Amino acid sequence: MARQIGEVILDLKNISLRFGGVKALTDISFNVREHEIRAIIGPNGAGKSSMLNVINGVYHPQEGEIIFRGEHRKDMNTHEAAAAGFARTFQNIALFKGMSVLDNLMTGRNLKMKSNFLQHALWWGPAKREELEHRRKVEEVVDFLEIEHIRKTPVGRLPYGLQKRVELGRALAAEPSILLLDEPMAGMNVEEKQDMCRFILDVNDQLGTTIVLIEHDMGVVMDISDRVVVLDYGKKIGDGEPDEVKNNPEVIAAYLGTQH
Amino acid sequence: MTAARTDAAASDDRTTFPRLLLAHGRERGDRPAVREKDLGIWQSWTWAEAAREVRGMACGLAELGFKRGDRLAIIGDNRPRLYWAMCAAQMLGGIPVPMYQDAVAQEMTFVLQDAGIHVAIVEDQEQVDKLLEVMDQCPELQHIVYDDPRGMRHYSQPFLHGLDEVIAAGCIHDTNHMDFLDQEIDQGQPDDTAIMLYTSGTTGKPKGVCQTHRALISAARGGCSFDGLDGDDEVLSYLPMAWVGDNLFSYAQALVAGFTVNCPESGDTVMTDMREIGPTFYFAPPRVFENMLTQVMIRMEDAGTIKRRMFHYFMDVAKRCGADILDGRPVGTQDRLLYALGDLLVFGPLKNVLGMSRIRVAYTAGAAIGPDLFRFYRSIGINLKQLYGQTETCAYVCLQPDRQIKFDSVGLPAPGVEIKIADNGEILVKGPMLLKEYYQRPDATAESINAEGYFMTGDAGFLDEEGHLKIIDRAKDVGKLTNGAMFAPNYIENKLKFFSYIKEAVAFGHDRDMVCAFINIDMGAVGNWAERRGIPYAGYTDLAAKPEVLQLILECVEQVNAELAHDAMVADTQIHRFLVLHKELDPDDDELTRTRKVRRGFIAEKYGILIEALYGGKASQFIETEVKFEDGRKGKVSADLVIRDARVFPHAAAKHAA
């Protein structure tokens, strides 16, 4: 028996986002349930990344409401989002290229560190204990993602597929309850995609993490998601289980470009 | 442990592995037996803890119905608990059968069926999945026990068990019926089969080689006394558990001498783990040493001018006097001083990077090692030696003694081993380490051991004037050209493979008028070579077909021809024509054995069209080949292969009358 999909934990209502005269998102509503894998798909420029940015507070929508675990708010801000258990990866890898994999993962623990700057500088008392504890957590992530062999390698020297995995690792190091993945498989070969799928499913299954992901590879999306929302030119044109979405004529039109 | 138990075990005379383990647990219980890196930290288990775990595991296995004479399949990387599973099976009088962990499911069925496996202990989900895949074909398989529970949460089959639970149940059983296991251990006899190892199947179907406790323990004792291994040594266990060498070094010798076995974190971290552990005793097949040297050379090419010059200067010093210093031969004062300086600046740091700073004894075997490669390691002060043996002889026939190293021999017969050369040149051996039998194959057993009790190795070789054994080739591989000249394909292939650019080679010539060869380039070395020359390439097949690469390989082939021309015995077998294969020879495609030996017959058949082209004088040949990916899917690669003629040299010695 697989994980139990729970209540709605994140509910987005009538979100609209404009940049000057450009309407990035128009009146979009959808929700995310606990422990599910929720995919956002759509052609280029459909507003998928903007949607993720709204969720974790990078962008503030002009209209609409976000209800997170029963709490109503107009928008999130990035600190609150991170503290509330959101973590994300980016379309273009955003790691510290000159730092080792371990150090990059440790940055994911940043929010959980309690001791002050001076204690850390001296690596004394609680700071030392704390760092050992965080390192233990990070090692669990290393074990989980099977990246033992690159622990001490500077990230910049790693192949792209592994960098993506490290980025996922950094997000996981924050022990998120909701994980936002922006095109986790972009630019990967078949084998790397398979690995990544397995890791995403494992995260969802074993850690119970709710996952919202953007992806272009339809095969991947339809395989691993529980529900899919489809955007096109900033509007929602489909929402539902993979099979339902696959047969939605509007979705087919948006993707294949057939005449209405 | 209670007094009663200690007494029961004390009556042993250390003739079986379980008794050895209990003795270590009793006498030096607080010394480290096994280490494993887990979550980034080296965890160790003492001998006492190991003994306790093994007892628990044995009782747990007994609860699953495993009993005397049963075979226990063990599949996985080198994990402490998989080594313990071997001992646990032996405690119950069962026979562990370690299997190659990287084999695909279908390849496993043969061994599972042949050995009649009821119970298998495997490492993780991956191996469980493989077994589930072939479960239908192996009706006798009743229980699968897994070490790592990750990903196993949703498997509900009743015949799957977590090793933790099995051990926990076993520990309870052991406390309640303390004498059960002691009695089982007492029943174990030195002449019981201790382990079954399957031969790699270079010829035909694999055969299960049954080795007794006595054979393995005497081979281990001989090896330990030969090299003075004791309880303070450290070994890194990273070679497949199904291979006899790992069984000898990481299990038999570890239990005999009581040294510490270190299990790496994963297959990919061996180099790092080795640096951290600094083993004192090390074994690797030649290709591992070769890879390390290639890595060092590539990195030196990319290093700054000063470092590079320093490296080359001191490597010249080492080449001149390093091996002599190691062997204790007289060396001039100036060279000694330079070598000491080199050790400080180059060799020491280099050994440290390779994780070889503490090595007292390093062995290589399994294939011929290039003289340059061998000299390199010895010259920087690593006591690298060769040994010779096979699964049937516990990998214990010849060892090179310290200070008497000859590059082209495998050393003197090991203590207790007797060697005879048959009339056809085949090497025959006799000693306590010989196999008991091939499992359920009395025909094969009778074929391999002759009337006088000698095991026929199938290798051709001779003893030199000082009694050192030299191996030429597999006796059956040695063929003849149509002009009657002896053709030893391995000999030629090894010469080719000594070039870092060439990974594999297959030579043809038996019953032909000339020698031709297939060559596999080494992706790392040739790729780096191409990059430095600004030659763009899109992957293996493309790189292998570059005219510049063909020219590079041609130069290597011609150099081999020049060397062959020096020796009248093999001067006729210079390589006339060759081609560079479009894909790497791969065990997944059955072209190599799991121990990476070339399967000559299979290749000749599969690439028959290429052989025809070589001998038919064609300038190129199109070929399409099916390849198997690691996940079991199949694909195709195709290429138009260019065939090149190589220059052959006149015999250096006067051509004998023909």
Image: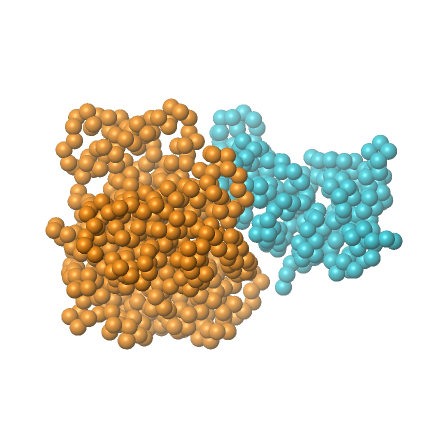
Chain colours: A cyan, B orange
Q: Residue furthest front?
A: B657
Judging depth in this view, the residue of B396 and B216 nearest the camera is B396
Quadrant showing the C terminus of chain B: bottom left
Q: Residue furthest left?
A: B465
Q: Position of residue B477 (x, y in %)?
A: 29, 61
Decide if residue A27 is on the left or right side of residue B18.
Answer: right
Judging depth in this view, the residue of A91 and B430 nearest the camera is B430
User: What is the quadrant of residue B241 in the picture?
Assistant: bottom left
User: What is the quadrant of residue B633 in the picture?
Assistant: bottom right
Residue drawn where x is 33% and y is 26% of the image: B310
Q: Is residue B567 visible?
A: yes
Q: Is residue B399 above or below residue A82?
A: below
Q: Position of residue B527 (x, y in %)?
A: 47, 41
Residue drawn where x is 42% and y is 42% of the image: B551
Quadrant showing the N terminus of chain B: bottom left
How many discs mark residues in the rendered view? Answer: 0
Q: Position of residue A29 (x, y in %)?
A: 82, 48
Decide if residue B301 is on the left or right side of residue B214.
Answer: right
Residue drawn where x is 29% and y is 68% of the image: B210
Residue drawn where x is 87% and y is 53% of the image: A260
Decide if residue B610 is on the left or right side of residue B233.
Answer: right
Decide if residue A62 is on the left or right side of residue B444.
Answer: right
Q: Position of residue B577 (x, y in %)?
A: 38, 51
Q: Is residue B408 visible?
A: no
